[in-house]
Structure formats: structure tokens, C-alpha cells
Image: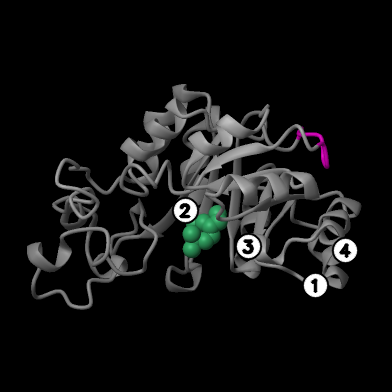
Amino acid sequence: VVTTTAAADPSVVVNVAHRGASAYAPENTIAAFELAAEQGADMFELDVQETRDHELVLMHDTTLSRTTDAETVFPGQSPWRVGDLTFSQIRELDAGSWFGSDFHEPVPSLGETLSAMQGSGLGLLLEIKSPDLYPGIEARVADELLRNPLWLTGNRVVVQSFDWDSMRTFHEELPQVPIGLLGTPKAAELDDLATFADEINPPYADVTPSYVRSVHDEGMQIFTWTLDDPGDMSRMISYGVDGIITNKPDVLSDLAVTP
Ligand code: G3P
Ligand code: CA
């Protein structure tokens, strides 16, 4: 789905649902990923962290306070870090009700998500969040993907992080999986980064036509975030980006011809 996209073709852009269709359903839950599929996304993005007992779970913030009811369920666990609670404790939490009173969702494990979304046809942009907090997480993510081999065909999964050293490590663990680097490396750095990376994924405020050309000249793709406005999406498409990461995949579906 991903790496075969024609670079710089303004009529083709990969539609990536950021934390799922997170404008309409609670982020990093199966409900948000299923809605992304209904809204025409090509891929869904998620954030992986680790519990105290090394289960891989989906959570954006390094604490549980914003997107779960952890402060109510475990009042003595301040500051409610993901890595301080066991998986069984985190499963007691509701990751939906903060978003709206109609939503009640568990915090999914990565394994559950891979199983639930396997038949969706969507690709996965898997972010390892704050890997410095979870030594060895790269190997555990690689093992989970190896347990789900249907995800390893056709470049269906891309693994990304703001931590580029972690991505070098992941590339050594599982070289067949494409790597994305979050952030905006200088043009002079791209040649070295292209030795292990396949995508450069900057915030859209940093993207210019010449930066897109620099990334493409090194044989990499560029996926930009996080755009919900159709005017911004059209501008990024005109610059030749390969993918757009959005909380509103329906807006991009209505705008673009996607693969
Ligand atoms: O995929 C891009 C985006 O997820 C990076 O930022 O903070 O939403 O994880 P953040
Ligand atoms: Ca993310």
C-alpha cells in the first residue's frame, strides 16, 4: 500500500488516519480504527508504549490521565504513567468516556489491534512512542509483528518514531519493515538517514516543495501531519507529499484520489 505509491503524483496520496478517525472517536481505540476504515482511510496510525509487565499497549501520552479514567480508578497511582501500571490494571480503565459519554472502550494491546484490524485491508503506521522509557521495546514490537505475519507482507506496516536511534535499532531487528522518521531532518542529513529509513514524516508547517524534492531525491517518501483542513491538504498534495496523516480521513477521502 505504501512504498509503491508514485512519488510526487499530485493525484495520489495515502490517507492515514491519525490515532484512528480521532476527530470522531476516542484516539488509539479499535472503534477509531474501524471508523477510519469506514471513512476511506488507506492506513491507520497508532502509538505504542509498554505497561509495567511489558505488554504493548496503545496510548499517546506517557501518562493515562488525559484519555482514561485512571485518576478515578487508581487514585493512589499518581502520576499515572503507562509504565507504572500492569496490563491487567490498565484493562480496568475506560479509554472512551473522556471523549464522550456514549463511548466506552478498553485500552487495546498491540496484539489485539493487529488481530482486530487484520481483515480491514488497511495499512498500519505504527509509532513507537518515547522508546527511551521502555528499553528493549523495539525487539518486543518486532516479535509482535512476527507473531502476525499477515501484517508483514506487501509493506503493510511502517514503523516510525521521533527517536531516530530507536529506528536504527528497529531496522536491525526487522529489516523487512519500512521505517519512518518523525521530524524534519536537515537536507544534508537525508543521505545518511536513507541508509535505514524509507519515510521522512515532518509536521506540515515544515514542508516545502524543495524539501519534498530533497526527500524524494534520496529515494524516500514523505508523510506529513496533522492536517484536518481541506485547503492545507490540497496544498500539501500540490507539493508532492506521498501521505497525509489526518484526524479526519473522511475530509481527505472527499478531496483526493487515493490508491
Ligand atoms: O504520525 C504523526 C504524529 O502521530 C506524530 O505526533 O504527537 O500525534 O504522536 P503525535
Ligand atoms: Ca503518533
173 and 15: which one is in front? 15
Q: Residue at x 38, y 38 (%)?
A: 113
**Front position among marks 4 and 1:** 1
Q: Are marks 2 and 1 in contact (CB under 8 Å)?
A: no
- Magenta region: which residues? 4-9
From this view, report whether residue 249 is shown above or below residue 184: above
User: For the residues marked 3 and 4, what is the alpha-carbon distance in whole angstroms?
Assistant: 20 Å
**In the rendered image, is residue 254 in sight?**
yes
Q: Earlier in the sequence, mark 4 or mark 1?
A: 1
Q: Which residue is mark 2?
A: 140
**Front position among marks 4 and 2:** 4
Amino acid type for the residue under numbered disc 1: Lys
Q: Residue at x 31, y 67 (%)?
A: 83
Q: Which residue is mark 4?
A: 191
Q: Residue at x 88, y 54 (%)?
A: 213
Q: Earlier in the sequence, mark 4 or mark 2?
A: 2
40 and 84: which one is in front? 40
User: For the residues marked 4 and 1, what is the alpha-carbon distance in whole angstroms?
Assistant: 10 Å
2 and 163: which one is in front? 2
Is 7 inside the magenta-drawn segment? yes
The numbered mark at residue 203 is 3
From this view, report whether residue 24 is shown above or below residue 213: above
User: For the residues marked 4 and 2, what is the alpha-carbon distance in whole angstroms?
Assistant: 29 Å
The numbered mark at residue 186 is 1
